[in-house]
Image (cartoon, grey):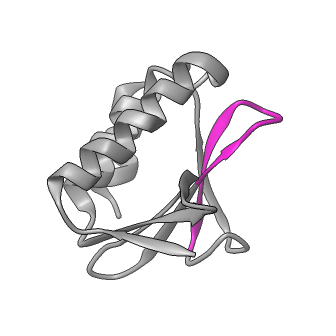
Amino acid sequence: MAQKITTTTELRDYFSKVMIRTDHHALGVSQVALAVIGGIIWRATEINVLERDGETKNVLWMKTLNSIFYFTYDHTKDEIVVKQDNHKGSELRRFTNTTSLADVHLFFFTM
């Protein structure tokens, strides 16, 4: 089920939970996640997150003026994955702590 993020409080609460989870279970993306979060806030015209059994999960999709981008966490490879349109869409990018800030910026700048 989708939960639309409509207030800054909801946004902060969701991303706070994401950052807590990265510090415990996703150390390979714990640093880059902050830059990706900034890019999402910068470019999104709408943000939705997956909610299951009353809890939000590490699945987010954002709309921009032209597209939908779907963000998930790959537990096997410890990477943030971005796909076009939906969870089965074309894979556009993967982010890890080895991704440079310049690469994160370029990805979001060219959306």
Give the percent coordinates (x, y) of residue 104: 39, 38
Residue at the (27%, 65%) spot, across then down: 44
- Determine the main secondary structure of the stretch shown in magenta: strand
Query: In the rendered image of this protein, does residue 86 appear above or below residue 60?
Result: below
* The magenta stretch spans residue 41: no
Segment colored magenta? 72-84
Query: In the rendered image of this protein, does residue 1 appear above or below residue 42?
Result: below
- Give the camera-side residue of 1 and 36: 1
Q: For the N terminus, which image quadrant?
A: bottom right
Query: In the rendered image of this protein, does residue 26 appear above or below residue 88?
Result: above
Residue 33 position by quadrant: top left
Give the percent coordinates (x, y) of residue 48: 41, 68
Residue at the (55%, 25%) spot, across then down: 22
Residue at the (30%, 74%) spot, across then down: 64
Give the percent coordinates (x, y) of residue 14: 38, 46
Q: Is residue 48 left or right of residue 92?
A: left
- Residue furthest to the right in view is 76
Q: For the C terminus, which image quadrant?
A: bottom left
- Give the camera-side residue of 100 and 74: 74
- Give the camera-side residue of 53 and 15: 53
Is residue 27 at all visible to an observer of this figure? no
